[in-house]
Image (cartoon, rainbow, N blue to C red):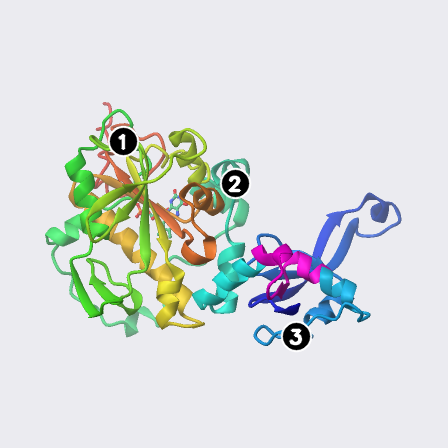
């Protein structure tokens, strides 16, 4: 059997601090500090605690060249344990073929190693972030100020007022008025279905290809309404459709060339429950008529930007641009829109059948009719969207 180390692994000397009553009684600080070494690997779901022997043994293997396994060596037990955890990879042994497949997938995608790890570790599962914020008193601006103190300044000044060059203020045009009306919607009208034409127009504007440029039969670039790093447009739209006329509620993939919906199997729980879970409990978004999970195909971006330190950043920017196109498109059509990166990626991956390092979600951007009553606050200080009722005499 031949073995090598997995493609992407980092070792962290982790310190966990816990309350320790015994330490308090004996005059200490009342804290216990436990230190351990953790191996964090891009192809594994969990972290792996390693002892000093395993740590050293792992360092004896390279990620590319294969070495022959020697069952008679004094290190054989340590090597086997590293194979079991997936930190070492066997070339062709059925016992550990799942680890090998996962590792191969990471290799084939050409991830820059720190980005692969950051992406994998930042994912949530089953988290209710809304409840956590509310419990911590962090769900209002006043609560944030109270708990965290003042934030860094809202506007930076690098020179004194006298040294600034004043610029002319240009009168608002139609586009300025559109920009001014864009306000994150946290109050959707669940009682009113979205007409199919509006839904289709939104998808066409935000995700459809306008043209294809064929370099070779296997190498095609598409033109869309939003910029994309390298012109690669790797970000797919996976849809949660809840309330659209003529479209059965459910999960879909959007086909950007055909401008068509590809139905996918239903999630493992009622759709509304899944939508709320995907949004990590943010109930103020959960009634949106349609939501797009923004999920880049990492290998398409990293085909050009191989193991590139900026490539993951470019994908995050791509999703940001898509969400802005979605916001503005919705605003122009009289709809509300939102974006959030506070999502339960693992629940979403499981529902849509996505592998996080191949095609994992970064954000959800949704749209639909805004409700008539504001139940959750929106940031509309200039009253572009919500007109205050006149004060009673
Ligand atoms: C990357 C990103 C992530 C966001 N995540 C959340 C979120 O998790 N929950 C939420 O209620 N709003 C979220 N928002 C919306 C912001 O809170 C909102 O843009 C901000 O309060 C300013 O309000 P406005 O969009 O109406 O101008 C997010 C916005 C961006 C750009």
Q: Which residues are magenta?
A: 81-98
Residue under the image location 51 percent in, 46 percent down: 124
The residue at 15%/49% (across/down) is: 177
Q: Locate the N terminus and report the quarter of the image it occupies.
A: bottom right
Quarter placement of the C terminus: top left
Quadrant position of residue 181: top left
Residue 90 locus on image (x, y percent) = 62, 64
Callout 1: SS = loop
**Can residue 334 be seen in the rendering of this structure?**
no
What residue appears at the point 39 percent right and 63 percent down from the top-left corner? 299
**Left or right, 255 with reference to 52:** left
- Residue 307 rendering spot, x and y as whole percentages: 45, 72
Q: Is residue 303 above or below residue 136?
A: below
Give the mark nearest the N terminus, 2 or 3: 3
Name the residue tied to disc 2: 127
207 lies above or below 264: below
Residue shown at the point (64%, 55%) measured from the top left: 95
Camera sees residue 51: yes
Query: Is residue 150 a member of the stretch shown in magenta?
Result: no
Q: Which residue is mark 3?
A: 67
In screen coordinates, is 175 left or right of 269?
A: left
| Picture disc at residue 213 | none
Residue 92 part of the magenta segment: yes
Task: Return the residue at label 1.
Answer: 248
Q: Earlier in the sequence, mark 2 or mark 1?
A: 2
């Amino acid at each position: 059997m031949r073995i090598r180390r997995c493609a992407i692994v980092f070792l962290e000397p982790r310190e966990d601090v816990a309350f320790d009553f015994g330490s308090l009684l004996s005059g200490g600080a009342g804290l216990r500090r436990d230190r351990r070494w953790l191996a964090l690997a891009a192809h594994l779901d969990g972290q792996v605690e390693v002892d000093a022997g395993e740590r050293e043994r792992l360092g004896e293997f390279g990620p590319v060249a294969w070495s022959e396994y020697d069952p008679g060596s004094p290190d054989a037990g340590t090597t086997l344990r590293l194979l079991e955890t997936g930190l070492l990879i066997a070339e062709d042994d059925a016992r550990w073929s799942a680890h090998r497949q996962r590792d191969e997938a990471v290799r084939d995608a050409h991830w820059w190693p720190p980005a692969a790890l950051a992406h994998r570790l930042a994912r949530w599962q089953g988290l209710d972030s809304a409840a956590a914020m509310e419990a911590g008193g962090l769900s209002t601006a006043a609560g944030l100020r109270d708990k965290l103190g003042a934030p860094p300044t809202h506007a930076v000044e690098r020179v004194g007022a006298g040294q600034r060059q004043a610029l002319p203020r240009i009168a608002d045009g139609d586009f300025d008025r559109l920009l001014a009306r864009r306000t994150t919607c946290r109050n959707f009208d669940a009682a009113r279905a979205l007409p199919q034409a509006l839904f289709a127009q939104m998808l066409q504007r935000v995700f459809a290809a306008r043209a294809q440029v064929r370099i070779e039969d296997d190498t095609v670039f598409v033109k869309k309404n939003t910029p994309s790093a390298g012109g690669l447009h790797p970000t797919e739209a996976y849809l949660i459709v809840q309330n659209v006329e003529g479209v059965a509620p459910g999960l879909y993939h959007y086909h950007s060339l055909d401008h068509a919906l590809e139905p996918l199997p239903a999630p493992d729980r009622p759709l509304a429950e899944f939508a709320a879970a995907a949004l990590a409990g943010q109930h103020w978004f959960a009634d949106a008529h349609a939501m797009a999970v923004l999920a880049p195909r990492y290998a398409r971006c990293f085909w050009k930007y191989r193991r590139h330190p900026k490539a993951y950043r470019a994908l995050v920017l791509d999703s940001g641009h898509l969400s802005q196109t979605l916001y503005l498109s919705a605003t122009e059509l009289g709809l509300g829109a939102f974006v959030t990166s506070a999502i339960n990626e693992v629940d979403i991956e499981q529902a849509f059948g996505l592998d996080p390092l191949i095609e994992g979600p970064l954000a959800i951007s949704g749209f639909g009719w805004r409700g008539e009553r504001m139940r959750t606050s929106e940031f509309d200080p200039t009253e572009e969207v919500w007109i205050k009722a006149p004060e009673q005499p």
